[in-house]
Image: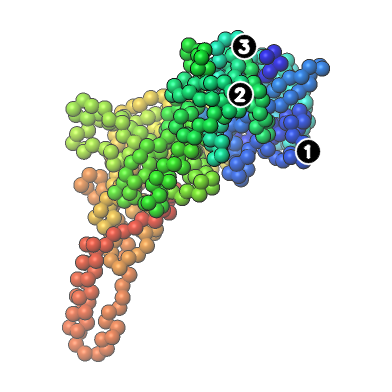
């Protein structure tokens, strides 16, 4: 056990975590030169296309240090704020972390939040400054920033270029020297923490775990703490580039377990595995239950695919423990699921992965956050969906979730960023200069204001230099109203939103204008109205497609034309009463991008 090191790589998005992981795999010869490719641990097409890590990946390397063989278990983590739950799980199963900072960009908001998470878990931090080969690298300035952040000396900081491999080799020695071996009792009852799981159609659920105490071997009878279910161990082994079977996984080590579980619901990430005959007394306290922040409805494009969608979401949940879903139905879209996500990028990625990995095309409704509604009867209702709102007369007051946002940017963008935050109902809490030309701003803002396009806007006005991180700080009272969209007099429940009173009028008007462009013309006029309760606040009309019924009347009395037009008018009126309006999927997506 003294020769095992468990560590993860944490950094802001695009600071070079996956590239550094590639170099470490090369140096330890975990991969042959033939198998080597860029971002080798990012095995999803989506990750390669977008250049981001979405899932944390575990891999074991072997390293010879002073004649002794060491096992290094590396867990690569995502850097985007929406995937911070993946980071928390990786940190829970490690004893040390490499903190990677980009020499061209310096310390960013996500770097700081991931660092605090690691320090809270008592991890040993090794600071690494990457991209020193770039022309725009400011090595001395960034080294000072990192030293201020960690309270270390400049000699402790490793200067590397992960792309060229310069300076990477000494990091492996530092991992062995600085990161402590796992503390575990091999003779105690088995206690193993599940930190990830995947679904294999042939072998069932494969769970990745870290052994805290005891050991697990092929043929053991184990049970899962949370569900109480018992299983026979079919296979255990190590996580290399492929799964390598082994007879036993000992204390402090990381590995995988296959027990032939076919039902996705039986494995919970964060659960503890123990022996049936000699169980441990308590589960491992590792990481908290994740709370989704953004909710949206997902519906199958064909109504008869509802059960298929349920099976797909069940398997997907295994691969992404932060995803949440429950059944719901909508008047406009039929049966579907109310899904919870950690942010808008997470929503986009889930939708894309469902399509690519499971060939499941879904309609997604307008995302919103959850609110606490206090009724006049003294009840508290949690509302995820505008259609679940009680009548306005029954509402005493509404509370919405607030976040503490941390924005780090260059000082030249200070003004536009403050204006953006004030427009989104933000309150400035504090500001301080990290260096002469970089500033950190802390704002309290409603979560609903950042859900749509706040991050995109922030990147635009700061020319890509601002970084953004946030955490929930609780609920606060708010003046919110439910804005309904009526199409041909019928409410389209999938387009309803909860919005702040002051913004309702302009938002309603913009929504009507946008829908007018997107809804195809019919044989009858379609009025598009925005309403708060019974009060209409905006209206647009999609004009009907008209046929010239008087074309065949040449000459003669005008009353002949009038008669035909009146007859057409009657037909249009009758058509409008029975006609239904189909809302295209592009209309739901356009609501998200209203400002553009």
Q: Nearer the viewer, residue 281 or 459?
A: 281
Q: Nearer the viewer, residue 320 or 292?
A: 320
The earlier-in-sequence mark between 1 and 3 is 1
Task: Name the secondary structure under disc 2.
Answer: loop
For this view, does 89 lie left or right of residue 450?
right
The quadrant of the rendering that contains the N terminus is top right
Q: Quadrant of residue 307?
A: top left
Crowd tier of the residue under label 2, counting other residues whose Cα lies within 10 Å: few below 14, some 14–19, many 20 or above: some
Position of residue 304 measured from the top left corner of the image (x, y, whole percent): 37, 51
Q: CA distance from mark 1 to mark 2?
A: 32 Å
Q: Quadrant of residue 57?
A: top right
Q: Which residue is mark 1?
A: 33
Above or below, 505 relative to 487? above
Position of residue 423 measured from the top left corner of the image (x, y, whole percent): 41, 38
Above or below, 34 relative to 379? below
Position of residue 336 measured from the top left corner of the image (x, y, whole percent): 37, 44
Residue at figure coordinates x 60%, y 41% from the top left: 44
Front of the two marks 2 and 3: 2
Residue at figure coordinates x 48%, y 23% from the top left: 230
Residue at figure coordinates x 39%, y 32% from the top left: 446
Above or below, 511 relative to 83? below
Residue that extends furthest to the right in the rendered view of this protein: 67
Crowd tier of the residue under label 3, counting other residues whose Cα lies within 10 Å: few below 14, some 14–19, many 20 or above: some
Question: Which label belongs to residue 218?
Answer: 2
Task: Name the secondary structure under disc 3.
Answer: loop
The earlier-in-sequence mark between 1 and 2 is 1
**Circles 1 and 2: CB atoms closer than 8 Å:** no
Q: How many marks?
A: 3
Q: Which residue is mark 3?
A: 186
Task: Name the secondary structure under disc 1.
Answer: loop
Residue at figure coordinates x 18%, y 80% from the top left: 563
């Amino acid at each position: 056990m003294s020769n095992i090191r468990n560590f993860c790589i944490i950094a802001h998005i695009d600071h070079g975590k996956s590239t550094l992981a590639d170099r470490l795999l090369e140096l330890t010869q975990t991969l042959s030169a033939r198998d080597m490719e860029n971002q080798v641990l990012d095995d999803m097409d989506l990750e390669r296309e977008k250049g981001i890590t979405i899932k944390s990946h575990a891999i074991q390397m072997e390293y010879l240090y002073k004649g002794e063989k060491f096992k290094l278990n590396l867990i690569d983590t995502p850097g985007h704020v929406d995937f911070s739950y993946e980071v928390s799980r990786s940190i829970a199963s490690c004893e040390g972390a490499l903190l990677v900072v980009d020499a061209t960009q310096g310390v960013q908001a996500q770097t700081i939040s991931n660092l605090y998470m690691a320090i809270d878990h008592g991890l040993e931090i090794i600071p690494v400054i990457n991209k020193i080969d770039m022309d725009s690298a400011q090595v001395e300035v960034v080294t000072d920033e990192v030293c201020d952040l960690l309270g270390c000396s400049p000699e402790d900081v490793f200067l590397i270029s992960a792309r060229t491999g310069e300076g990477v080799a000494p990091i492996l020695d530092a991992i062995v020297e600085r990161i402590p071996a796992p503390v575990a009792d091999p003779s105690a009852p088995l206690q193993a923490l599940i930190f990830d799981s995947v679904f294999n159609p042939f072998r069932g659920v494969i769970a990745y775990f870290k052994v805290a105490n005891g050991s697990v071997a092929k043929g053991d009878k184990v049970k899962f703490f949370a569900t109480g279910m018992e299983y026979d161990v079919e296979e255990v082994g190590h996580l290399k580039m492929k799964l390598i079977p082994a007879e036993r996984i000992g204390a402090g080590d990381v590995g995988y377990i296959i027990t032939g579980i076919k039902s996705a619901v039986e494995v919970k990430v964060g659960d503890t595995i123990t022996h049936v005959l000699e169980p441990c007394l308590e589960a491992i306290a590792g990481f908290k239950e994740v709370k989704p922040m953004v909710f949206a409805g997902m519906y199958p494009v064909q109504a008869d695919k509802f059960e298929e969608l349920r099976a797909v979401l069940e398997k997907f949940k295994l691969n992404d423990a932060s995803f949440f879903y429950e059944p719901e139905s909508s008047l406009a879209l039929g049966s579907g699921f109310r899904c919870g996500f950690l942010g808008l990028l997470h929503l986009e990625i889930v939708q894309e992965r469902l399509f690519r990995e499971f060939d499941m095309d879904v309609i997604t409704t307008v995302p919103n956050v959850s609110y606490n509604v206090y009724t006049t009867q003294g009840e508290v209702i949690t509302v995820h969906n505008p259609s679940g709102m009680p009548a306005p007369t029954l509402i005493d007051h509404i509370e919405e979730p607030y976040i503490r946002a941390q924005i780090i940017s260059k000082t030249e963008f200070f003004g536009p960023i403050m204006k953006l935050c004030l427009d989104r109902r933000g309150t400035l809490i504090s500001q301080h200069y990290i260096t002469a030309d970089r500033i950190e701003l802390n704002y309290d803002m409603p979560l609903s204001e950042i859900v749509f396009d706040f991050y995109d806007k922030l990147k635009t006005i700061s020319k890509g230099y601002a970084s953004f991180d946030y955490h929930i700080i609780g609920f606060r009272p708010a003046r919110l109203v439910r804005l309904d969209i009526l199409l041909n007099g019928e409410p389209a429940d999938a387009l309803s939103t909860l919005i702040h009173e002051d913004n309702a009028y302009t938002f309603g008007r913009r929504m009507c204008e946008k829908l007018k462009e997107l809804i195809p013309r019919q044989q009858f006029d379609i009025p598009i109205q925005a309403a708060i309760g019974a009060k209409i606040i905006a209206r647009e009309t999609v004009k009907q497609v008209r046929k010239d019924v008087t074309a065949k009347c040449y000459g003669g009395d005008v009353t002949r034309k009038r008669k035909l037009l009146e007859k057409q008018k009657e037909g249009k009126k009758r058509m409008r009463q029975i006609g239904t309006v189909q809302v295209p999927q592009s209309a739901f997506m356009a609501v998200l991008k209203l400002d553009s």
